[in-house]
Each structure stands twice: as C-alpha cells, then as structure tokens.
Image: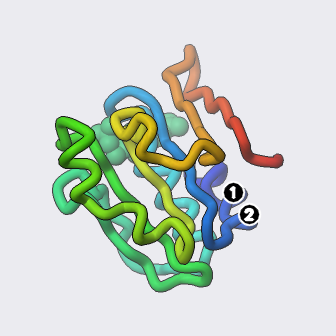
Amino acid sequence: MIELGRRLAARAKPGLIIRLIGPLGVGKTTLARGFIRGLGFEGDVRSPTFNLIFEYSTQPPVCHADLFRLSGPREIADLGLEEYFETHAVLIEWAEKAGDLLPEDAATIELSFADVGREARLEGLET
Ligand SMILES: Nc1ncnc2c1ncn2[C@@H]1O[C@H](COP(=O)(O)OP(=O)(O)OP(=O)(O)O)[C@@H](O)[C@H]1O
Ligand SMILES: [Mg+2]
C-alpha cells in the first residue's frame, strides 16, 4: 500500500481526486500515507477518521479526508471538501458515502482483502 501510494504520487496534481473505497482496515490510510510521503512529506500521516480532514503543504498540496463518521449528504456537504478540489490532490476514504457530491471524473481505488495481502482495482487513473 505504501509502495502503490508512492507510485501514484508521481501523478499528483491539483484537481486529482481519488476515492479510496474498501472495508475497515484494508489499507486506505496506508495507501494515502505512501502517496503523501511520495510527495516528500516526512512527518506523521495519521488517519483522518476523527479529524475528518488533514492538509499537507506538499507540492501539490494534499487534502486527506475520511467520511466514515459522517452520516449523510448534508454532513458531508458541510465538511466543505469542494474547497480543495481545484487546488489540492484530494484523497477521500469512505468516499462512497459522498455519492454524487464528488465530481464525476474523480478516480477510484477499490481495495479488498485477498488470499495473500490486498487487491487494488484502479479506475480513472493512468498507470
Ligand atoms: N497490504 C497490506 N498487508 C498487510 N497489512 C496491511 C496492508 N495494508 C495495510 N495494512 C495494515 O492494516 C492496518 C489497517 O490499515 P489502514 O489503517 O491503512 O486501513 P484503512 O482502510 O484506512 O482502515 P479504516 O477503514 O479503519 O480507515 C494497519 O495496521 C496497516 O499497517
Ligand atoms: Mg483509514
């Protein structure tokens, strides 16, 4: 997950929005950590489960969000995620909760548990 995140960081640009989908503990935060580290950030990359959003002053800047604790479109709209859409690379855990509040052209990474390790399905990202 760290390695996949690091590789994807090469494609980071403002306006890149990635939905991170997959069950509890599958590795969404870990992938985001690799992505943010791949942009040169050397500090802690923590799970935004409780803070909802963390920002990183990388180049491009990153917004790492987690919608797990939010219940409906109203709460998600109030989070103000769209403020980041043009300026940041945006990584969103539990993004399926946002439904159509996210731009249609957002990329998706779907993670699942495999017999050994994890499986990742990428959509809307050139490899
Ligand atoms: N490919 C992997 N193989 C083995 N362990 C992994 C892998 N990816 C992540 N982990 C471990 O699984 C645990 C959960 O990972 P992580 O917090 O990234 O999951 P998450 O999908 O963000 O969970 P949540 O749904 O709670 O936000 C961590 O201890 C992490 O180190
Ligand atoms: Mg997480």
Q: Position of residue 76 (x, y in %)?
A: 26, 49
* Most distant residue in the right direction: 127
| Among the 4 quarters of the image, the one containing residue 104 | top right
| SS under mark 1 | helix
**Looking at numbered disc 1 in the image, what kind of residue is underneath it?**
Leu
**Looking at numbered disc 2 in the image, what kind of residue is underneath it?**
Arg
Please tell me which residue is depicted at 49% across the width and 22% down the height of the picture.
Answer: 113
Judge whether 123 appears above or below 126 on screen. Answer: above
| Among the 4 quarters of the image, the one containing residue 87 | bottom right
* Most distant residue in the top direction: 115
Please tell me which residue is depicted at 21% across the width and 45% down the height of the picture.
Answer: 74
Judge whether 78 appears above or below 89 on screen. Answer: above
Q: Which residue is mark 1?
A: 8
Left or right of 83 in this view: 108:
right
Q: Which residue is mark 2?
A: 11
Kindly check if marks 1 and 2 are in contact, taking CB atoms under 8 A apart as contact.
yes
> Dot 2: few (<14), some (14–19), or many (≥20) neighbours within 10 Å?
some
Asked whether mark 2 lies closer than 8 Å to ligand 1, one says no
Residue 77 is marked as: none
Judge whether 111 appears above or below 126 on screen. Answer: above
